[in-house]
Image: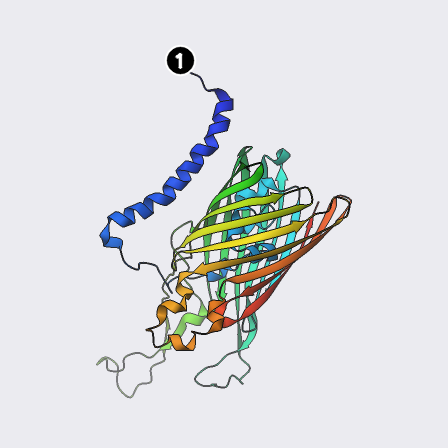
Amino acid sequence: MQINFGDHMMRRFLPGVLAVALVGGAVAPATAQTRDSRIQRENTGVGTASGEFLLLGAGARGMALGPAVAADSRDVDGLYYNPANLPLMDGRQVGLTVMPYFADTRYVWAGMATPIMGGDYAIGISLSNFGFGDAPSYTEEDPDGTGGLTYGVSETVIGLSFAHAFIDRFTGGASLKFINDRLGQTSAFGFVMDIGTNYHAELSGRPIAFSFTIQNLDVFGIGLKHTGEGLSIPADPDTRDPGIPGDVAVDPANAEIQATAFPIPVVYRVGLAYDIMAGAERRLTLLGDFNEPYHTKPGFSVGGELAFTPTDMPFGAALRGSYAYQGDNDFAERRGDPFSAAVDNDDSSMDGITAGAGVSYKLSNYKLQLDYAFRHFGVLGSRNAFTVGLSW
């Protein structure tokens, strides 16, 4: 006897099989660690990664909700958090985010995305930049930096994203990103990829979504290696060479410092979003995330968003907040460290706290969105991020 499940059954059970496979892939390494004592030690690459500007985020909404927004970023910010979410957008969207950073640096992110072919596919492009310019150059000859020499830093990422809705409950996507990292008179470049999935269904009649993402996967596995004029140095020949008379002047030879290539910070994330209140005019979404970065200890984040969208008014509003834990910033674990006294204060306990709000206005087929996020970076202090977006 032959049994044929048919397309309907495959469409019904395939998402569950994929979800089980993802969970199994995440649990298997953890199980292996408990059985193999050879890796029961601290093996993270703390302080060895380059290009950490790749982790600054995108969109004030996403920044306020933390990394867990990867399961719920159904807007242009999905270009950064999870490209698999792009087919779930209502229409075309553009967004611009500005965040003044510390020490007179600034971070800018911009993106544009659109569903195509009836929402079965989606494409998008993003651009981000971190840096500063015209900073005084301090040298041994000019220790006060008054000689007029300046330098700047410009770290730029250009991303192209593509996503597909495989079935009505499962989407997948990828972003290919080009990195140009200019530090003074040196530069490096590289290619990384983001890969994401989103499984969305209903639980007790309310939306629920699971996500799995890999961010900044190095395409060629070579990291970032800087080269340029800034690594060139004059080197005096060894006048002790018997072939060179001691009274003969010898011009310095040109030499170049060979910089070491540093890996790019790859992050693996598993996220969950659930609408515990889902009405026509009000929505309350809770989010959670577990992440495993290459360059630091594992962490997690939790957040929530309360949104108001009155059906009889063109205005909308939302309140957001989250907390993200990162193990290497937990200064309570460093009580025996002599350097911990300098950072063990009330500010350190606030590291990872974010909050924000947003307002929107609909006019005909257009929707204008303004979002704000407050981010606390522990001992460094707090920063503000602002986003303006347009969808149609």
Seen from this angle, which residue lies furthest top?
Answer: 1
Quadrant position of residue 49: bottom left
Q: Residue 242, position in %: x, y?
A: 21, 81
Indicate left or right for 274 with 215 as reference: right
Q: Nearer the viewer, residue 130 or 84?
A: 84
Q: Residue 36, position in %: x, y?
A: 24, 49
- Residue found at x 51% / y 59%: 323
Q: Would you place residue 98 above or below residue 312 in this image?
A: below
**Quadrant including the N terminus:** top left
Q: Would you place residue 388 above or below residue 381 in this image?
A: above
Seen from this angle, which residue lies furthest bottom?
Answer: 247
- Residue found at x 40% / y 69%: 331
Q: Residue 212, position in %: x, y?
A: 46, 44
Three-letter code, disc 1? Gln
Give the class, few, some or many, for how many residues have Cα within 10 Å of label 1's Cα (few <14, many ≥20).
few
Indicate left or right for 316 with 208 as reference: right
Q: Would you place residue 68 above or below residue 139 in this image?
A: above
Q: Would you place residue 158 above or below residue 11 in this image?
A: below
* Residue 100 visible, this angle: no
**Quadrant including the C terminus:** top right
Q: Secondary structure at mark 1?
A: loop
Indicate left or right for 342 with 367 as reference: left
Here the colouring is rainbow
Q: Residue 189, position in %: x, y?
A: 46, 58
Q: How many numbered marks have been drawn onto this rendered protein structure?
A: 1
* Residue 221 visible, this angle: yes
Q: Which residue is mark 1?
A: 2
Q: Nearer the viewer, residue 318 or 78?
A: 318
